[in-house]
Amino acid sequence: MTTERQLTHIDDEGRLRMVDVSEKDSTERIARARARMRLSEPTLAAVLDGKVPKGNVFEAARLAGIMGAKRTWELIPLCHPIRLTAVAIDFHVDRSAGMILIEAEVKTCDRTGVEMEALMAVTQAGLTIYDMCKAMDREMCIGDIELTFKSGGRSGTYSRA
Amino acid sequence: MTTERQLTHIDDEGRLRMVDVSEKDSTERIARARARMRLSEPTLAAVLDGKVPKGNVFEAARLAGIMGAKRTWELIPLCHPIRLTAVAIDFHVDRSAGMILIEAEVKTCDRTGVEMEALMAVTQAGLTIYDMCKAMDREMCIGDIELTFKSGGRSGTYSRA
Amino acid sequence: MTTERQLTHIDDEGRLRMVDVSEKDSTERIARARARMRLSEPTLAAVLDGKVPKGNVFEAARLAGIMGAKRTWELIPLCHPIRLTAVAIDFHVDRSAGMILIEAEVKTCDRTGVEMEALMAVTQAGLTIYDMCKAMDREMCIGDIELTFKSGGRSGTYSRA
Amino acid sequence: MTTERQLTHIDDEGRLRMVDVSEKDSTERIARARARMRLSEPTLAAVLDGKVPKGNVFEAARLAGIMGAKRTWELIPLCHPIRLTAVAIDFHVDRSAGMILIEAEVKTCDRTGVEMEALMAVTQAGLTIYDMCKAMDREMCIGDIELTFKSGGRSGTYSRA
Amino acid sequence: MTTERQLTHIDDEGRLRMVDVSEKDSTERIARARARMRLSEPTLAAVLDGKVPKGNVFEAARLAGIMGAKRTWELIPLCHPIRLTAVAIDFHVDRSAGMILIEAEVKTCDRTGVEMEALMAVTQAGLTIYDMCKAMDREMCIGDIELTFKSGGRSGTYSRA
Amino acid sequence: MTTERQLTHIDDEGRLRMVDVSEKDSTERIARARARMRLSEPTLAAVLDGKVPKGNVFEAARLAGIMGAKRTWELIPLCHPIRLTAVAIDFHVDRSAGMILIEAEVKTCDRTGVEMEALMAVTQAGLTIYDMCKAMDREMCIGDIELTFKSGGRSGTYSRA
């Protein structure tokens, strides 16, 4: 049998871990994120006019964003499992520019923030729009995925300039 | 770059959202639900006599009901992720009538109720019975899926008449 | 060390197993299922008139049914993982009777059928309608969950009378 | 009992569905996607020098991208479940510009393509980098998420100009 | 904009990837694995006599093993998603020695083997036994988790000596 | 309609249930577990020297252990869903003996302990090492999976002798 002394410890530095949040307070935390999606003008017209063969794009994207936000901890390896208390997703469009602005707000009352959940919400919503329109348009692009606001927790409130 | 003024907001009414429960209190919440399953008399006899080739039907259905209840928030799009503190599933049978009554009780201590979790438990249990018996009987029917009781939360206690 | 002779085998009969379908042919298989949901007349009116605060009920229920069908093998313990090639969900309503008829059709090309996937689709759709309306109506009931058609595989075609 | 004649069909147009791919051939299909991530120069330096407290950023992001790609069908509502036969993720950096280029290649042999899986891979990799660095830098931005190549299937080969 | 020339490639060697199995043939593949679990004599007696308060230990462990095997590709990062065509789990006990031998057999017809699925099955079964008995016995130990047989694929048949 | 009196209750004893923890206090709970993995000397050398073709073994195993711990409640049928506040995984090796010692520590602040989560973490880490090395070595063995410490909750602190 190997004794403790013969063992060599692996990877003292740089090793992956899920940060210990045991000592943090459970407080209300809010995060908002956004993404901008570029589509061709005819593709966006089909979305807005309900002509996408796979169905109602905005409703599917909303649900996918909400459901994706809830599963952030499963997909982002070091995220803590937390209980979301609210998720809302909003779309704004500039039809002539072929642009959809996706915004999400996520809330929790827990020991860690929901920045990743808000980013996940806008990302999954964007990918769902992409999926529904990809037969029409392969040049679509999802970009500008950013955190726009967070509050709660030790690091306080942040608003993107 | 598109400026805020040029954007059109999509879907002010009727849009899907996960209701904000941040302001609700974490309290003990209980829900009970039931389902009634109709099987042919020989099928139910096989279930009761342990003659179903796929194995022990009630034990599989119980586990499927418990495991399904825990995953309600993944499957029902607008359900909040909550931590269940208890799940129990019960079966009663009327052999001559070819009927299995499935009952579930679910508890949590959280900001929202567990009605959907109790309904999910009886439904997944019923579908598992169906799956195990479907090679013998394609006329089975799951019905009368109903909430029978809930307590906790602002809306108080409810008992089905 | 224990030798083979000293071991007692557990549960020769009645043990749970996932049926071996290795020898079956990969063929096209279709299944259809239905459920009937009872709602109060005002609740169904709110659904049809787009007045449910959580959002568009039919779109959410469709997506939940489709997504639930894909995950049948995760939730029903002895189902085989299979690749669905099509899922469609349909709603019919009888407004004065307070009834929603939910129908699903699922297809695959695999070694086993998709009956459970079709039943899962109608069930998850029904539970999602329930979830979205439960603040208005606790007397809703999901019933008559049945297989209506299947084709493909050794057991041939089945149509509910 | 409601008869068929009394029923009103809901949502003939625009309803969500999972496209029927039963008639498509199972052929080898490849897709490649990319994303560009902007980080502050000190954040990227910490990533490259192994100084991020949560651990090895590129290894975590690779795994998250691979694991996310496999679960695309669970998260994107209308994607078909398919069996990936290969996933690879690559990173290139421009240290002075604070930019990480994320590229993914996904393969399958199935009835539908893997464009969404490749896009999911780069997105989940990017979000994982974001998660690991967010305590240092809240101004990070993930953008330019695009399909760069696809082959296989009826629509043939596509290469982004 | 960064040009290709300015980019530095990260991690040419040692990077994580999901091995490309596109060129492998879809053939029948079988794997068997085992684990040995040590329990105190009174704990094993409670298991065998049906006196464990959480319920029927072997049935729960069988189902957990089967369900875990199906989800191997979600949990083991570089495993390919494959469709299992059969999973069976067997238990043998040596009551006086306080030992449960757990065996699993898994089959598929795919481009890669099911060794990990068989190992996952015995492991999840063992952990479930542990969970159900842990209030009685904290000294339990799961060991000797090994592949005992595999067939199919380019590397041919293997049987543990 | 069947009346209550005609119904027979199934399985009064021995039925599976998720234990009711509603009355337990939410307190900090810690658990530690370990596993020992045996590899051939050349296989362990390849792991330590970064020569395993699938990539960095320890980083993949760490992530798999962390991600598996978070999903314990999905896989172990009667485990409660809980929110982990910390997960860390450590490796020690004895190169000449061909042994990797895997240790995990998991924390939560909840109504039930995290013993299963710690055991799951070491198990999934071990299986991931197995998966990455199995092309080189089929004789690997994972063993000695044990709880080494727990604190918190009514049953107090436990340390393996």
Image (tube, coloured by chain):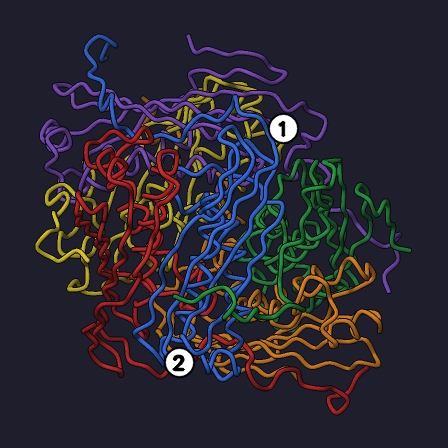
Chain colours: A green, B purple, C yellow, D orange, E red, F blue
Q: Tell me if F127 is positioned left or right of B115 in this view.
A: left
Q: Mark 2 lies on which chain?
A: F
Q: Which of F68 and B157 is in front in this view?
A: F68
User: Which residue is the extreme one toward the right?
Assistant: A161
From this view, report whether residue B121 is shown above or below residue F36.
Answer: above
The C terminus of chain C - image quarter: top left
Callouts 1 and 2 in the same chain:
no
From this view, report whether residue F94 is shown above or below residue E132.
Answer: below
Disc sitting over residue F41 in the figure: 2
Mark 2 secondary-structure assignment:
helix
Q: Mark 1 lies on which chain?
A: C
For disc 1, the marked residue is C51
The crowding category of the residue bearing disc 1, from other C-alpha atoms within 10 Å (few below 14, some 14 to 19, many at least 20), is some
Q: Nearer the viewer, residue A72 or D20?
A: A72
Q: Tell me if A101 is positioned left or right of D67 in this view.
A: right
Q: Nearer the viewer, residue F30 or F78?
A: F30
Residue drawn at x 51%, y 26% is: B114
Q: Is residue C70 visible?
A: yes
Please give the count of numbered marks on the rendered protein: 2
Percent x, y of residue A80: 62, 49
Between disc 1 and disc 2, the foreground one is 2
Percent x, y of residue D130: 71, 62
Distance (Cα) linking label 1 and label 2: 68 Å
Name the kind of residue labelled 1 in the image.
Answer: Lys
Q: Which of A64 and E38 is in front in this view?
A: E38
